[in-house]
Image (cartoon, grey):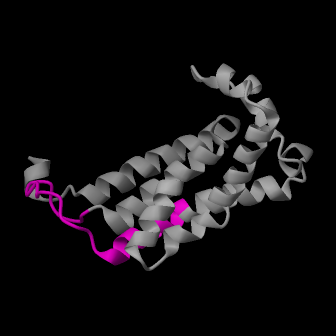
């Protein structure tokens, strides 16, 4: 009955779920202070405000191409995530990032190693250092491609990420 009345909308649902999650983050303090928790709140808020269709669920329309204005905040959020991920590595003044040796430790110390982690860890140090350099290129200058007015450049930036 509530859904068919037209009161409940996609955007309203996103905002409600995001508000509940924000409430958990505030209450959880130390358990919810990671980068991905804030990212989930920002994504849910932006989706609810800018991207989710603000129409009744009773209509259940097929997916329509969203207005370009609605997708820009989501693009900027992805840009911010990637750019800040790269900048924090530079600003940390950590010798492993400065000397491009971070991947020499990463595969041996990650919490949940993938099935190929041991094999990648055995690669020559030069290959691992090139991987760290590629990380810097992808996360800092290539992140700007996500904000390009050209669709082709944005797609290239998304593939690089």
Image quadrant in which the C terminus is located: bottom right
Q: Residue at x 11, y 54 (%)?
A: 60
| Placement of 112 over or under 15, stated as above or below | above
Q: Position of residue 101 (x, y in %)?
A: 84, 41
Residue 61 magenta-highlighted: yes
Does residue 43 sit above or below 106 in this rendering? Answer: below
Which range of residues does the magenta coloring cover?
53-78
User: How many dots with numbers?
Assistant: 0
Image quadrant where residue 67 sits: bottom left
Measuring 80% from the left and 31% from the top, which residue is drawn there? 105
Position of residue 42 measured from the top left corner of the image (x, y, whole percent): 51, 57
Q: Nearer the viewer, residue 95 or 137?
A: 137
Q: Answer left or right for 160 relative to 9.
A: right
Q: Position of residue 160 (x, y in %)?
A: 53, 56
The answer to which of 65 and 33 lies nearer the viewer is 65
The answer to whether residue 138 is magenta is: no
Residue at 63 percent of width and 57 percent of height: 138
Using the rendered image of the protein, determine whether residue 74 is visible from the camera's viewpoint.
no
Q: Is residue 140 visible?
A: yes
Residue 120, image quadrant: top right
Q: Is residue 51 left or right of residue 141?
A: left
Q: Position of residue 133 (x, y in %)?
A: 74, 52
Picture quadrant where residue 50 is located: bottom left
């Amino acid at each position: 009955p509530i859904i068919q009345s037209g009161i409940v909308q996609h955007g309203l649902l996103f905002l409600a779920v995001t508000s509940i999650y924000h409430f958990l983050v505030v209450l959880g303090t130390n358990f919810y202070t990671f980068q991905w928790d804030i990212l989930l709140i920002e994504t849910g808020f932006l989706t609810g405000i800018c991207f989710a269709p603000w129409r009744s669920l009773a209509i259940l329309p097929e997916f329509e191409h969203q207005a370009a204005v609605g997708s820009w905040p989501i693009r900027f959020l992805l840009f911010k995530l990637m750019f800040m991920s790269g900048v924090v590595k530079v600003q940390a003044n950590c010798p492993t990032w400065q000397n491009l040796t971070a991947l020499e430790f990463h595969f041996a110390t990650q919490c949940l190693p993938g099935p190929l982690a041991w094999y990648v860890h055995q690669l020559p140090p030069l290959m691992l250092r090139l991987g760290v350099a590629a990380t810097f290129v992808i996360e800092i200058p290539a992140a700007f491609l996500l904000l390009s007015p050209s669709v082709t450049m944005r797609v290239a930036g998304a593939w690089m990420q």
